[in-house]
Amino acid sequence: MGRAGSWDRPAIAWRRTPDVAAGVQGAGCACPTIGGAISASTDPPTKSKRSNRELARTTGLVVLAVVATLFAVFNLEKVEVNWIVGKGQAPLIVVIVLSALVGVVFTHFAERRSAKRRR
């Protein structure tokens, strides 16, 4: 709680905005702001140009996404899978994705174990 009679709300501060252009009516007027922050930006929006590296990376990711989608669509046939404890059928893309995930998990744990040995 604040002092007696005070309210729990942000203080209103009066700031003078910079002159936008000479001769513009209202330029440089005192405008209320809440909490002492300037209320509005007078800068025109700037368009940021993407670097060639960023464009190449984005293009590469889009191409990779299209190739992965086509790969999945063309590998929907059911294949027989030996699950060690039994046999079953699953779409080929599921078998490929599960194999890749198992490989990623094994690689992660192998790298962690190798890093612990180096310390």
Image (cartoon, rainbow, N blue to C red):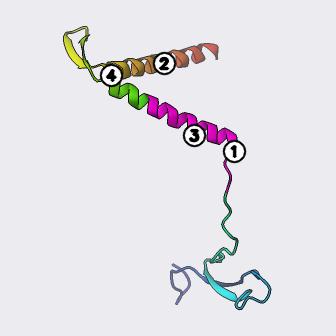
Which corner quadrant of the image does residue 58 belong to? top right
Q: Earlier in the sequence, mark 4 or mark 2?
A: 4
Toward the viewer: 67 or 112?
Answer: 67
Q: Amino acid at mark 3?
A: Thr
| Local crowd size for mark 4, using a 10 Å CA cut-off: few (<14), some (14–19), many (≥20) | some
From the top left corner, tell me how far across and down residue 74 is, in percent.
Answer: 34, 24
* Residue depth check, mark 3 versus mark 2: number of the one nearer the observer: 3
Determine whether the residue tagged by mark 1 lies in a helix, strand or loop: loop
Q: Is residue 52 magenta?
A: yes
The residue where tag 4 is placed is 75
Q: Which mark is residue 51?
A: 1
What is the magenta range? 48-67
Q: Do the numbered discs 4 and 2 sit on residues whose CB atoms are within 8 Å?
A: no
Question: How far, Cα to Cα, is label 4 from label 1?
Answer: 36 Å
Q: Which mark is residue 58?
A: 3
From the top left corner, tell me how far across and down residue 12 is, in percent.
Answer: 61, 84
Q: Amino acid at mark 2?
A: Phe
Question: How far, Cα to Cα, is label 4 from label 3?
Answer: 26 Å
Q: Earlier in the sequence, mark 3 or mark 2?
A: 3
Q: Earlier in the sequence, mark 4 or mark 1?
A: 1
The residue where tag 2 is placed is 109
From the top left corner, tell me how far across and down residue 1 is, in percent.
Answer: 51, 78
Question: How far, Cα to Cα, is label 1 from label 3?
Answer: 11 Å
Determine whether the residue tagged by mark 3 lies in a helix, strand or loop: helix
